[in-house]
Amino acid sequence: MSNSTLILLIIAVAAIAIAVVMYYQRKKTQKLKAKFGPEYDRLVDKEGSPRRAEAVLHFREKRVEKLNIRPLSRDECDRFAAQWRVVQEKFVDDPRRTVTQADQLVHEALQARGYPMGDFEQQAADISVEHPQVVDDYRFAHEIATRDGRGQATTEDLRLAMQRYRNLFEHVLDKNVVHFEEVRRA
């Protein structure tokens, strides 16, 4: 075999290897985009590149795998649904206090599920692994609750926060919670 044939063979093998790597990278990116949706895009913007965002998402997945996240028991679902109903019913009379209570109730329910409760951004990151479709709701509602603590939220902001908390509550805490018609009617 001549040197030029060997060089062409090496180049062909390298080109095939590069194509295979690019194919698998594209598939991995598509899978992460499909799983994380808007959270993927938010992280790409925050991190400055898809590769760094994907590394963050992989780290999150590995972290959450180690946590003991569990579904709520039927009794826990009943208790949290009843508490949510009480909180939601008070909104008209005291929207500020209600949003604070909704934030606390979501926090308690997530803790009961096994999510570590400390830094809010870490909580949101952990939730994004299993519930990426509602993590934006969590961030949005929590940001309003925080602004309200500084006296910077309007009643309309508070109403929107309650809607987002309800959406989070119904999707993240336990699928059985949505069976309570009272939660949706109030």
Image (cartoon, helix red, strand yellow):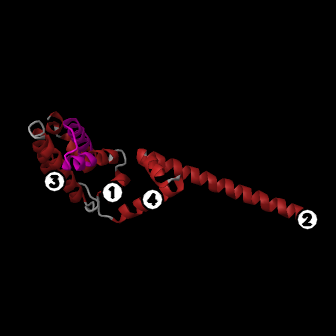
Q: Residues within 10 Å of mark 4 (few under 14, many from 20)?
A: some
Mark 1 to mark 3 CA distance (whole Å) = 25 Å
In the rendered structure, which disc, 2 or 1, sits on the residue that comes first in sequence?
A: 2
Q: Secondary structure at mark 4?
A: helix
Reading the image, the residue beneath label 1 is: 121
Q: In the drawing, does residue 30 fall left or right of residue 163? A: right
Q: Nearer the viewer, residue 106 or 185?
A: 106
In the rendered structure, which disc, 3 or 4, sits on the residue that comes first in sequence?
A: 4
Q: Quadrant of residue 186?
A: top left
Give the label on residue 76, or none.
3
Q: Residues within 10 Å of mark 3 (few under 14, many from 20)?
A: some
Secondary structure character of the magenta stretch overall: helix
Between marks 3 and 4 in the image, the one whose residue lies nearer the viewer: 4
Mark 3 to mark 4 CA distance (whole Å) = 32 Å
User: Residue at 78% of width from left, 59% of height from top?
Assistant: 11
User: Residue at 20% of width from left, 45% of height from top?
Assistant: 177
Mark 3 to mark 2 CA distance (whole Å) = 75 Å
In the rendered structure, which disc, 1 or 3, sits on the residue that comes first in sequence?
A: 3
Name the residue at the top extreme: 185
Marks counted in the figure total: 4
Segment tinted magenta in the rendering:
142-169
In the rendered structure, which disc, 4 or 1, sits on the residue that comes first in sequence?
A: 4
Between marks 1 and 3 in the image, the one whose residue lies nearer the viewer: 1
In the rendered structure, which disc, 3 or 2, sits on the residue that comes first in sequence?
A: 2
Reading the image, the residue beneath label 4 is: 56
Q: Can you give x and y, in whole percent of width and height, for residue 51 in the image?
A: 53, 56
Reading the image, the residue beneath label 2 is: 2
Kind of residue at disc 4: Val
Q: Secondary structure at mark 1?
A: helix
Mark 2 to mark 1 CA distance (whole Å) = 60 Å
